Image (tube, grey):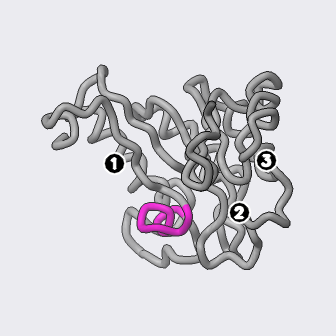
Amino acid sequence: YLAKKTGYDGVEIMGSEGYLINQFTAPRTNKRKDKYGGNAENRRRFPVEIVRETRKRCGDDFIIMFRMSVIDLVPEGSTREEVLDLARELEAAGASLLNSGIGWHEARVPTIVTSVPRAAFVEATRQVKDVVSIPVVASNRINDPDVAEEILKSGQADAVSMARQLLADPEFVK
C-alpha cells in the first residue's frame, strides 16, 4: 500500500530462494501446527493472503509481481504439484504476473555459475506458464540475447528477467 501511495506502479513480492515467504511453503522449514502449517494448502496460505491483501489495498490498477520458487533444489522442498497449485492460487488471489525463482541459497545445486547451461531451468518456468493465464517470467542463467529471444519465441515464458548480466555489462541491451 505504501508503494502505491508514494507513486509506484507496482511491487514484486519476494516469495522464493528460501526467504521468509518461501519458508512457509516448504515442508523443510514449515513445522507449524496452526492454519499456516501441515498440509500443502495450509503452507500456501501465507503467500496467498499476502497477494490477496495487497490486491485489496492497492486496487486493480496496481502491478503485483510475485517471485515464486519454481524449484527449491533442497531436501523437503515443495513438490512440482505444490508449486503449480501455488501458482494457480496466486493468480486467483490477484497476482498480475509470476517471476520464477530458482533454488534456495542453501541449495547444493549451482544455479548461476558459468558451469550451469544457459536457461537451464526454463522448463520449470514453462510448467508454471502452462497452468496460469497471467504472464510468467523466466530467470537464472539467461545472459545471451539469442537465448532470451528463443525462450520468448518458443512460448516458454512471457518475459525474461536479467540482473547479473545487466550489472556486468551495462551495454548489453544495446
Q: Which residues are magenta?
A: 17-25
* Vertical arrangement, residue 47 with respect to residue 9, above or below: below
Q: Quadrant of the N terminus?
A: top left
Q: Residue drawn at (73%, 64%), measured in percent from left and top?
A: 111
Answer whether labels 2 and 1 touch (C-beta < 8 Å). no
Please tell me in which quadrant of the rendered image residue 10 appears: top left
**Mark 3, residues whose alpha carbon is within 10 Å: few (<14), some, or many (≥20)?**
some
- Compute the Cα span from label 3 to label 1: 29 Å
Residue type at mark 2 is Ile
Q: Position of residue 141 (x, y in %)?
A: 73, 53
- For the residues labelled 2 and 3, the Cα–Cα distance comes to 10 Å
Q: Which mark is residue 112?
A: 2
Q: Given this view, does label 2 or label 1 mark the residue nearer the observer?
A: 2
Instruction: Tell me residue 123's x, y (percent).
Output: 80, 44
Q: Secondary structure at mark 3?
A: loop
How far apart marks 2 and 1 lie (CA) works out to 28 Å
Viewer-proximal residue among 82 and 33: 82
Residue 96, image x and y in percent? 45, 29
Which mark identifies residue 119? 3
> In which quarter of the view is residue 75 placed?
bottom right
Q: Identify the mark nearer the N-term, 2 or 3.
A: 2
Name the kind of residue labelled 3 in the image. Answer: Ala
Task: Tell me which amino acid carries mark 1.
Answer: Ile
